[in-house]
Amino acid sequence: MAELVLAAVTPHNPLLWRAMTDPVPDDLQPIAANFARIREAVVSHEIDVLVVIGTDHLRQFFYDNSPAFAIGKADAYHGTWENEVRTFGMEYAELTGHRELADRIAGRSVQPDAIDFSVSLEWRLDHAFVIPLQYVRPELDIPVVPIHANASMPPVPSVRRFVALGEHLRRAIEEWDSDARVGILTSGHMANDVGGPRTFAGSPDPEFDALAAGWMRDGDLDGAIRVCSEVDRLTAAGSMTSQFLNAVAALAAMGGRAADVVDVPESRFSTSPFFLWSTR
Amino acid sequence: MSRYMVDKFIRAVELGDATVAEYVADPPAFVERWLAGGGTPAGPTDDRVLTEAERAAFAARDFGALYSLGAHPYLLWHFTEAVYEHEYTEGFGWRELVERYRAAVAPQGLVDYIP
């Protein structure tokens, strides 16, 4: 049977692409070092497939049709949009999909019991997917199953649905008749405000950041569920803070156990999440 | 109030380089051209409606007004960046635009942007 061998949470801040170049500025060095640590873990765990959970930023998905969770079932994906190349200096990427695992996760003819998915057979991935992959696997040679989790267009699924997503991923991977070694790569934010009153003014809610790091350090899934159930609290913590829920899915996928690496460095941008669960 | 249409217009401008250039060249004319377009029964719906206040805010590139009208914050910031960055000079760059944006939206606090 296939094995879930690693889960990682990274930031996907696209402003890093121009800012974090040689020589890396002092405040971004911890971010570069954490990406390097996860990049090395992906190598040492000999991963065959990566399930990549991210949140599309109103690009592929919009309010004319906004799925809660969408599983990519395409054979290949284009990466990055024209506005991201313009605004962030990002580079276009082509990624290979993994139909077999995508079918295992989405259900081929009947939805899984715990959670309902949408599927997408044609999808241009935005920076929430491309940036983490470009930093943790610059070769872009590992097939991916992208999962859009809507944490950008209210109504956002409840934190319990993100937990169900993580638990379902573990089950689907472990029941897959394959010798593949699978990793989960999730990206999101700590407290983060883009376009609101505290745009690019550091972390809008350091107290939330401290709590959130604690849930990962202590393996406190119940704590995460309790606080993240308070939607007004998440909203007050910044316009994009809901994307922390993607990290909760990773915690749930790893059975709620404490992460092996927890680092949340502050930089000129905000607080950056780095969590890693390894098995080697 | 039609927050959905505000967000839809922002995407119609911001997603592509050509549309940003066309909008920046003449915002009021772009607004009128966009409103004149739309879908047919041969394809997915593509309705386009803006109120007078929304039309005026887009014609004036008035991000403070668009924030009060309930534009999605993430979309609005990137729209603002896209349609003002051609005006950057030595003394007015990204950081100054961020500060001008924040000065316009911060006094309004959190505005309901859910369509």
Image: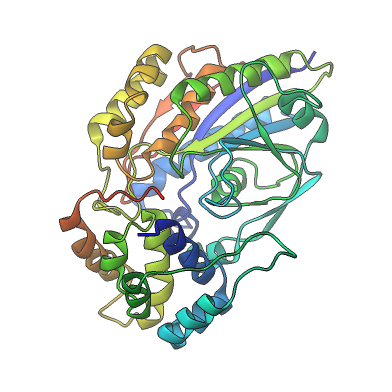
Q: Is residue A5 left or right of residue B30?
A: right
Q: Is residue A205 above or below residue A86?
A: above
Residue plotted at (39% across, 39% down): A272
Image quadrant holding the N terminus of chain A, namely top right
Residue plotted at (79% across, 17% down): A176
Q: Nearer the viewer, residue A57 or A65?
A: A65
Residue plotted at (63% across, 18% down): A168
For the question of whether residue B27 can be seen, the reply is: yes
Q: Nearer the viewer, residue A125 or B19?
A: B19
Q: Residue B19: image x %, image y %?
A: 54, 77
Q: Residue furthest left?
A: B107
Color scheme of the displayed model = rainbow
Image quadrant holding the C terminus of chain A, namely top right
Q: Residue B29: image x %, image y %?
A: 46, 86
Q: Residue B2: image x %, image y %?
A: 40, 59
Residue plotted at (48% across, 67% down): B9
* Number of numbered tags placed on the structure image: 0
Q: Is residue B115 above or below residue B62?
A: above
For the question of whether residue A46 can be seen, the reply is: no
Q: Dividing the picture into quarters, in which one does residue A238 lie?
A: top left
Q: Is residue A104 left or right of residue A92?
A: right
